[in-house]
Image: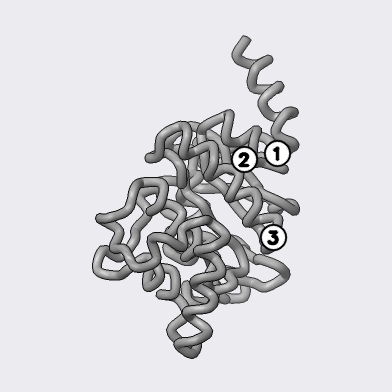
């Protein structure tokens, strides 16, 4: 059994959850999304309570309106790029779904693969479709679980810029899981350092990594 005991406030911009494998980064995201239910605690986004054990509040995954980008993309193989992106917009009109999907496809520069299936896309294209899908439904928060670990360095560099641009445009909290120092420094406005299920430190990226360098020197 894994014990997760964390408390932090996501600041404006992109909050990095940083730490070694097994630190509790993915578990934290899954709790926020509602994939797992904590034994106790309080989770809120934008003043809206997702979970409160004392008040017995636990709203569903669908009600939380969370955009989740998985490490392995998790695209539907039987749907085209545009269909994957618009999947979470089932209650909208066909025209609204199409327009919203094409807006975010354009943001990530993948309009050219809107009619392709995932198996006919490159790794970078698949990841851009996953990012576009996470933003298409106007989420309250975007959770990114090591989203760039499977792409090459050149593609990763471009995607980092696009993730930063997307957060600046939509102005919603992004929580980004990584154990890559370069990604954390390049993207993060704030870092939450996790280890063995607990918060070890929080602060600006340069401060956190300077502390780590001193400890390891």
Front residue of this view, candidates 116 and 92: 116
Provide the secondary structure element on which disc 2 rests. Answer: strand
Q: Dots 3 and 1: beta carbons under 8 Å? A: no
Q: Position of residue 51 (x, y in %)?
A: 57, 69
Q: Residue drawn 51% across and 54% down?
A: 29
Residue that badge 1 annotates: 202
- Position of 39 with respect to 43 (left or right) is left
Distance between the Cα atoms at labels 2 and 3?
A: 29 Å
**How many C-alpha atoms fall within 10 Å of the one at disc 2: few (<14), some, or many (≥20)?**
many
Q: Earlier in the sequence, mark 2 or mark 3?
A: 3
Among the 4 quarters of the image, the one containing residue 130: bottom left
Q: Residue drawn 30% across and 58% down?
A: 118
Q: Residue drawn 56% across and 76% down?
A: 56
Distance between the Cα atoms at labels 3 and 1?
A: 25 Å
Q: Position of residue 132 (x, y in %)?
A: 50, 62
Front residue of this view, candidates 30 and 71: 71
Provide the secondary structure element on which disc 3 rests. Answer: helix
Residue that badge 2 annotates: 199
Distance between the Cα atoms at labels 2 and 1?
A: 8 Å
Q: Nearer the viewer, mark 2 or mark 3?
A: 3
**How many C-alpha atoms fall within 10 Å of the one at disc 1: few (<14), some, or many (≥20)?**
some
Q: Position of residue 206 (x, y in %)?
A: 72, 28
Residue 100 seen in the figure: yes
Residue that badge 3 annotates: 169
Q: Earlier in the sequence, mark 3 or mark 1?
A: 3
Front residue of this view, candidates 193 and 187: 187
Quarter of the figure with the C terminus: top right
Marking on residue 74: none
Residue 58 seen in the figure: no
Q: Residue drawn 74% across and 37% down?
A: 203
Front residue of this view, candidates 12 and 197: 12
């Amino acid at each position: 059994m894994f014990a997760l005991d964390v408390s932090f406030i996501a600041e404006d911009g992109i909050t990095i959850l940083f730490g070694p494998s097994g630190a509790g980064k993915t578990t934290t995201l899954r709790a926020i999304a509602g994939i797992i239910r904590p034994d106790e605690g309080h989770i809120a986004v934008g003043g809206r309570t997702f979970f409160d054990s004392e008040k017995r509040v636990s709203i569903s995954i669908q009600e939380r309106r969370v955009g989740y980008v998985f490490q392995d993309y998790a695209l539907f193989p039987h749907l085209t790029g545009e269909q994957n992106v618009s999947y979470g917009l089932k209650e909208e009109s066909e025209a609204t779904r199409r327009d919203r999907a094409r807006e975010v496809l354009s943001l990530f520069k993948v309009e050219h693969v809107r009619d392709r299936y995932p198996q006919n896309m490159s790794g970078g294209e698949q990841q851009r479709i996953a990012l576009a899908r996470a933003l298409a439904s106007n989420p309250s928060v975007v959770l990114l679980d090591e989203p760039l670990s499977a792409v090459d360095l050149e593609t990763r560099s471009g995607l980092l810029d696009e993730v930063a641009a997307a957060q600046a445009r939509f102005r919603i909290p992004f929580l980004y899981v990584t154990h890559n120092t370069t990604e954390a420094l390049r993207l993060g406005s704030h870092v939450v350092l996790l280890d063995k299920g607990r918060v070890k430190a929080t602060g600006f990226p340069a401060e956190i990594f300077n502390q780590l360098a001193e400890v390891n020197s």
